[in-house]
Image (cartoon, rainbow, N blue to C red):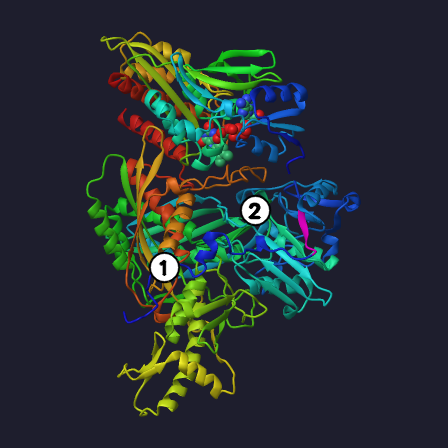
Amino acid sequence: MSDYSVIGKRVHNIDGTEKVTGSGKYTFDVVLPNMLYGKILRSPHPHAKILKIDTRRAKRLVGVKAVVTGKDTLGRKQGIWRRFPELCDEEILCRAKVRYIGDAVAAVAAIDEDTAEEALDLIDVEYEPLPAVFDPMDAIKEDAPQIHEGVELNININRHIEWGDVDEAFEKCDHIREDKFKCSSQAHVCMETHDAVASFGHNGKLEVWTSSQSSYYIQRLYADMLDMNESDIRVTNRHTGGGFGSKFELDSAQFCAAILSQKLCQPVKIVLTREEEFTATKRRTPMYYFLKLGAKKDGTMLAKEVRVITEGGAYTAMGATALYLTGFFSSFPYKYPNYRYDGYRVYTNTATTSAMRGFGAPQSTFVGESQIDMMAEDLGIDPVEIRRKNGMTPNYEVPGQAFIQSCGLHQCLDKIEEHIEKRGKLPPNHGIGVSAYGFMSGGIFNWFNTPYAFSAAVVRINIDGKVDVYTGTCDMGQGSNTTLAMICAEELGVRLEDVRMFSGDTGICPPDLGAWGSRQTLMGGNAVKMAAAECKQQLIEFTAAKMGVNIVYDLDIKDRWVHLVDRPERGVSYFDIVKEAIRGKDGVAIMGRGHYTPHRKGMISPAYSFGVQAAEVEVDPETGRYKLVNVTTAHESGTVINPVGIEGQLEGAIMMAGGYGFCEDQPMDEGKILNPSIADYKLIRSLDMPETDILEIDTYEPEGPFGAKEAGEGLTNPTAGAIGNAVYKAVGVRIYDLPITPEKVFKALKEKEKQQKKAKK
Amino acid sequence: MINDFEHFTPKTLKEALALLAKYGDDCKVICGGQSLLILMRQGLVSPKYIVDIKGISELSYIKDDKDGVKIGATTTHRAVEKSAVIKKKYPVLAEMETRLASVQTRNWGTIGGNVCHGDPAGDPVPVLIALNATLTVAGARGTRSIPVENFSLDYFEVDLKDGELLAEITIPPPPPRTGAVYTKFNIIESDLATVSVAASVTLGAGDGVCQDVRIALGAVAPTAIRAKKAEKVLKGKKITDALLKEAGEVAATETEPISDIYASEEYRLELVKALVPRMTKEALARAKKA
Ligand SMILES: Cc1cc2nc3c(=O)[nH]c(=O)nc-3n(C[C@H](O)[C@H](O)[C@H](O)COP(=O)(O)OP(=O)(O)OC[C@H]3O[C@@H](n4cnc5c(N)ncnc54)[C@H](O)[C@@H]3O)c2cc1C
């Protein structure tokens, strides 16, 4: 299918110029008349009763307009798992108790940020500190402090997934491995911190500008928390400076700005500081992983048993989804005939853990891909070969869970094998590790309890032939507006520059669940494609009538030319037809509506992408320091809509997932995050980036728009595992807990030396 | 939140010293601001008066004199890095600068500010110790000079009295047959050092004996330190791998590293043991070629 005129072309993001020149406006840039600035007071205690909050001194400070506490709220609890009220557990402005260092207790609106910050010091909060617990392994003990009333052993939620007969299958295995791993936390580190400008008008309506991944979720959660009609709330997402999973739940900036604005009927802006961003927003879920894997001598894997305990932090958030997905993706990308997963999410007095790019799968892929390499070594089988033997194939059903249509895993394995061969004999202390993965193209689950279609779009053609697309999808920098505009242009037969995107504004766009779970290309794309097709159909009908073509002919539009498919030279200008068609419709613009909700696609996702990554490291055995030399990824995501977009996703993912594997961490002392700044939180930067390469495999996903599927989060999954395997190949030590720091490698090398000496004796 | 302060921009050293004398304790010097502003933002320092010396042109220079190269205190890192004289005479100094922070920070930050900041993890001081540099400090009552290795007193504390400024850094001409190197161990390129090592080796004429050696370590004690005992292991001898290994072990005993979120105490010691021999060996190789 290479006769696309828009899809598959290398294009830059349609908003790229605005962004790189600095003229693009983010929530951060929004300034309204009479706008006030808000700041939030946060708990210094990991666990404490709030005895009293005295705001009188703060209110007296000149320039302070309002001070609010939990008493000024309806006392409701927010949660994104709305179908399950017991999982809606976060007040945001705490009334009786704080559960982590950073929990919000009061907020101030003042004429400027400095005054607001000064006022925070004048709020007197009397706490009664309670015993706190930080590690999930401690939190599940009988005598651990209870973090949420009535939640026994602090177990927030547990998930079970099972198929086949695992116990019986283990009996038949020739070799069984049991391994323990620990996955660390990770911060999203968006360039734009969480921020919001909330404006509550005298008309009783709320308008909010905010940096978000789902305007619709934020709108709905506001409606819950403020007891308002959804339609009286307009949430607008302008350019968003990164999300990575951190921006689709109601956050403290959004909520406090709205409460303050409601009180004053004046706009209030809150921008979280970088420190708040690190300590008082959500983060990747740390997990304890217990794996049991059984195989036949020939490498056929018969059974896998997975037990996971996750550090939940103070509230549920999206952590329940991470718990489920890490369990599901622990079976990826292999055909285990027998599989069992038990996961427990445990409350702790630490910052809440939730969604982050990959959503549980970077954890499961690190541990699973480490273990499969160990299994291969035990059995004397090549790592690529064992993956080939067990890897998923097209039209495979994950028993009772999911149906996989397109799957290019085996082609990816072939490409990576070729790549490794091409690297030839490696210099000493170099090693290449491989890691295979898969990911979903949007979730099917509806714990949010939306009554709407998962995606929806309206396409309107104006008199000049220019096309407006209205969709509730959110572009958070991942380029979804470009992708969707390309899909629209291709379907409609116009050029990319003819399409203008209106997205993420609940006031004008049909609801869409937003940008998470890698859903927008497939789901948003299907909705946009359908809406564009409806417009096109109207133009074609009109053209057929006007040209008086024989009924046996088909008409199509390509590159602004409405024509007979079999005789492309016979046609008319798209622009002329639009003008006439609108006149013919009594002056009504051409409009099309589209929507998409997955049906009959299992319980997880309508489609899955696959890939295999090879990471090459060079280890300095004297210090344990290693460098990422090269990361090559064989990748399939169905039809590639925009190759530049995929390259951007890949490079960004290696930076993020490489950091996860190599250095990113959030060490704590009694619940206090010790590195809440970009100076102290170690991220991979441009100088640390390895050389990267992408080997794109051609596949076609029947469920996706033009055959496209996920290409966003999945790429975050393989890297930590590939690094771990590469370090092992290079110097023979295996690291079981993330991140794989040079110090851990060094210690493991020393330990290995010791063991070898002992063995010699 | 940064507190309010009064900001002065003297144009000469004399004016600056007068201001410092006048405001004494309540006053802080700022140059590139790359370190001070961070401390002020965190509320760790809150001066009432700030004397901004960045605009004092008489303090920004790199001069090649017969008693060595002189660097004015307000010379930026970037200027040091790009200087032809430095690259020729003390390539190690220019190399060190290329790994100090990012170009943006090097364009603002100054070598004098760095030395006065007294961060034990700073890059320039170990190199300046290895190169045997001297500092010239100016005060209301005249100037005094002090070897760079004595200047740092404790964490973020240097030997500057109220009313004093660092004016100049003097690096003596390198003796013949001398090679010097520097490296820092860090997790992220261009980040501050977890451990750093500078070494300078001078060989005797024709005999290949180590006539002089200077080894300086960063980030393993409250200040950058000179590993004098380790130097002794090597001085006056023909350097061998065994001696280098010993020097590394001895150097480790001269340090008092801490454990922090970047590295444990034990790991820092191990890094010293690994990096001292490695860097000294590199310095030796350079000395042989010099
Ligand atoms: C992002 C970032 C990364 C960095 N990475 C590194 C790194 O890798 N390695 C490294 O070594 N440094 C690093 N630094 C620190 C920084 O480069 C230096 O400390 C900085 O150059 C200090 O110079 P300044 O002119 O900015 O000093 P300022 O911040 O202006 O002053 C620093 C201190 O010195 C005093 N002072 C300044 N000049 C004088 C003077 N002439 N006489 C007396 N007192 C004076 C000030 O009062 C203050 O106490 C980094 C800084 C940043 C912001």
Badge number at residue A277: 2
Residue B74 higher or lower than A708, as above or below: above
* Vertical position of residue B281 compared to residue A411: above or below: above
Label 1 sits on what residue type?
Answer: Asn
Taking depth in this image into account, of B116 and A352 the one nearest to the observer is: B116
Q: Quadrant of the C terminus of chain A?
A: top left
Q: Mark on residue A653?
A: none
Which residue is more in the foreground, B37 or A702? B37
Question: Which amino acid, by three-letter code, is at mark 2?
Answer: Glu
Which segment is the magenta one? A34-40
State the image coordinates of residue A526 (x, y, percent, origin top left): 42, 71
Vertical side of A751 occupied by A69: above or below: below
**Secondary element at image label 2:** helix
Do dots 2 and 1 share one subunit? Answer: yes
Is A284 inside the magenta-drawn segment?
Answer: no
Q: Chain of mark 1?
A: A
In the picture provided, is A448 more to the left or to the right than B179? right
Compute the Cα span from label 2 to label 1: 42 Å
Query: What residue is shown with label 1?
Result: A338
Would you call the spot at circle 1 few (<14 residues within 10 Å), some (14-19), or many (20 or more)? many
Would residue A561 appear left or right of A502 to someone viewing this image?
left
| Lateral position of residue A576 relative to residue A34, left or right | left
Q: Residue at x 49, y 21 (%)?
A: B221
SS type, badge 1: strand
Mark 2 and 1 residues: CB-CB less than 8 Å, in contact? no
Q: Position of residue A332 (x, y in %)?
A: 36, 57
Q: Position of residue A494 (x, y in %)?
A: 38, 73
Residue plotted at (55% across, 44% down): A278
Q: Is residue A514 visible?
A: yes
